Image (cartoon, rainbow, N blue to C red):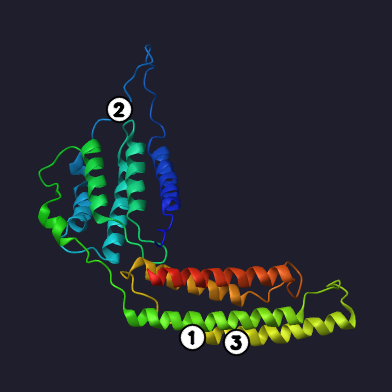
Amino acid sequence: MLPRPATMITAVVVTFAIAGVMKLSTRGMTSAAPDPEGLRDETPAQIESSRYQREITDLEAVLYQEAPPSMTDFMSISAALHEMGFAIADREMGPGARDVASSVAMLAAQSEVGEAGYALPDIAQLRHDWEALRSEHFSDEEWFRESTPAVESAQEVPAPTIDPSMIEDLLRAIDAIEALSDEGRRACEELGEPSYDFEQPGAEGEAHIEKWNDFARDWDEDVTRVATRLPSPPSWDADPELTAAYQDVTFAIRELRNATMGPGSWPVPFEGDWTARFDEAERLLSQARERLAQ
């Protein structure tokens, strides 16, 4: 399956930002008297929900809509949660408010769409997590929305299907890319790796570099040409295996395109460099075939 992008980085950034707001909002407050028993209850009272009715209503309008969620819907959910987290950090002064704001920010990160725009979050899990967070940290209100069988049924997303013609087009593209990879590997082996000082290559070295430069220009054109064999990318709601296979192929093309790059300041690659590129490209193409066969 296509791995979901790591949205935790966003959560960490937002959490630190919220912590900064909390620090500013509590600056100048007098310290509470020390607890001689060392047993002060640091558990915060529930937040007054009416202070955040607009933010909660905006969130729940999308979270509980009776329709399958789209990519835009998840973006709206994430934005509403981020706004709520910053609002809590700005308005609340009680102990533990920073932790509440951070929890909201983490849920916002959980609701974000994958980096490539393909992996959508689990709407049912988001609703469950939001209700748990709301129950723990917010005062109960009649205007809160709840999960119902009607909502759950309406939000069900049909199982993704794969267009057989797209599989065929992608497999034909893989065939062409593999054939080009074999040609490229042989051409690199014929050109050979450098055996001279790149700062003082001499006449023989300069001739070798020129041959590599000529091949590199032609090779880039060949890779670009074979890349046009790829069909259009899958839609955001396509089968995850098809999406992952498509990305494998695009990564393989990138490896092939870089096969003529030398390491560091070297103008041409060594055998280990181009071999690693071609091996990785072939591994990715083989992996894509396996995904499409499932």
Earlier-in-chain disc, 3 versus 1: 3
Residue to which mark 2 is pinned: 43
Q: Quadrant of residue 232?
A: bottom left
Determine the residue positioned at 29% across, 60% down: 74
Can you tell which mark lies on residue 221?
3
Instruction: Characterize the local packing of mark 3: few (<14), some (14-19) or many (20 or more) Cα atoms within 10 angstroms.
Output: few
Report the number of numbered marks. Answer: 3
Residue type, label 1 = Thr
Residue 279 horizontal/vertical position (percent)? 61, 69
Residue to which mark 1 is pinned: 228
| Dot 1: element | loop
Task: Judge by depth and name the residue closer to the eye, 38 or 66.
Answer: 66
Earlier-in-chain disc, 1 versus 2: 2
Determine the residue positioned at 23% across, 41% down: 132
Q: Quadrant of the C terminus?
A: bottom left
Residue type, label 2 = Thr
Q: In this view, does 244 lie above or below 4?
A: below
Q: In which quarter of the image is the N terminus?
A: bottom left
Q: Is residue 246 above or below residue 42?
A: below
Residue 104 horizontal/vertical position (percent)? 32, 45
Q: Quadrant of residue 237?
A: bottom left
| Dot 2: element | loop
